[in-house]
Amino acid sequence: MPMYQCYTPEGTLDDGQRSSIAAAFTDIHCSLTTAPPTFVHVMFHEKQPRWSETPFAIHGGVRAGRPQELTDSLVSQMTTVVADTVGAQTDQVSMTTQETPASWIMEGGAVLPEPGEEDAWVASHA
């Protein structure tokens, strides 16, 4: 957790672009939340999701409990990354987020910490 799923038309992204987007998503998420990079997962799907009318879509599953301003920045930065990578306008990229309580999520066999408690969690699970 978090899990970012990117939906693109078939054949849009090559391996280098996928790698670039995954690295950018990891950097964005970690810089905004201070979560460790090992928490971030990025998946790519070559299909149109049912919930989006745009050709490029992102769904982000994140831990609950963060300020709305953080989520707004995350959405803005990630949609810009995808638009820039594929050469599209930002209005061709949509993003949804879904928050899940940390107590409902496991990483490496352990329940995740609440936002802001990552350092102690990482130290105790090293």
Image (cartoon, grey):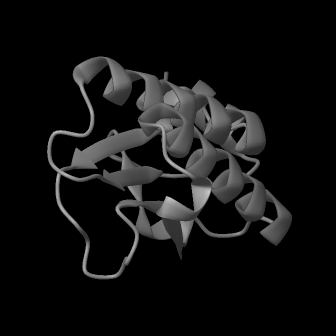
Q: Nearer the viewer, residue 120 or 99?
A: 99
Residue 116 visible from this viewpoint: yes
Give the camera-side residue of 88 and 24: 88
Tell me which corner region of the image, top left, top right, bottom left or bottom right, holds residue 111. bottom left
| Residue at point 49%, 21% (across, down) | 126
- Is 97 situated above or below 111? below
Q: Of residues 9 and 104, which is closer to you in this image?
A: 9
| Rendered residue at 42%/37% (across/down) | 86
Q: Quadrant of residue 37?
A: top right
Q: Is residue 114 visible?
A: no
Left or right position of 113 against 112: right
Up/down of 79 relative to 16, above or below: below
Numbered circles on residues, count: 0
Q: Residue at x 33, y 39 (%)?
A: 108
Residue 51 x, y percent position in the rendering:
34, 82
Residue at the location (48% across, 37% down)? 87
In this view, 91 is above or below 43:
below
In the displayed structure, does residue 99 sit left or right of residue 35? left
Q: Position of residue 109 (x, y in %)?
A: 31, 45
Q: Position of residue 62 (x, y in %)?
A: 53, 60
Q: Position of residue 18 (x, y in %)?
A: 33, 29
In the picture, measured across the screen, residue 37 lies left or right of residue 51, that is right
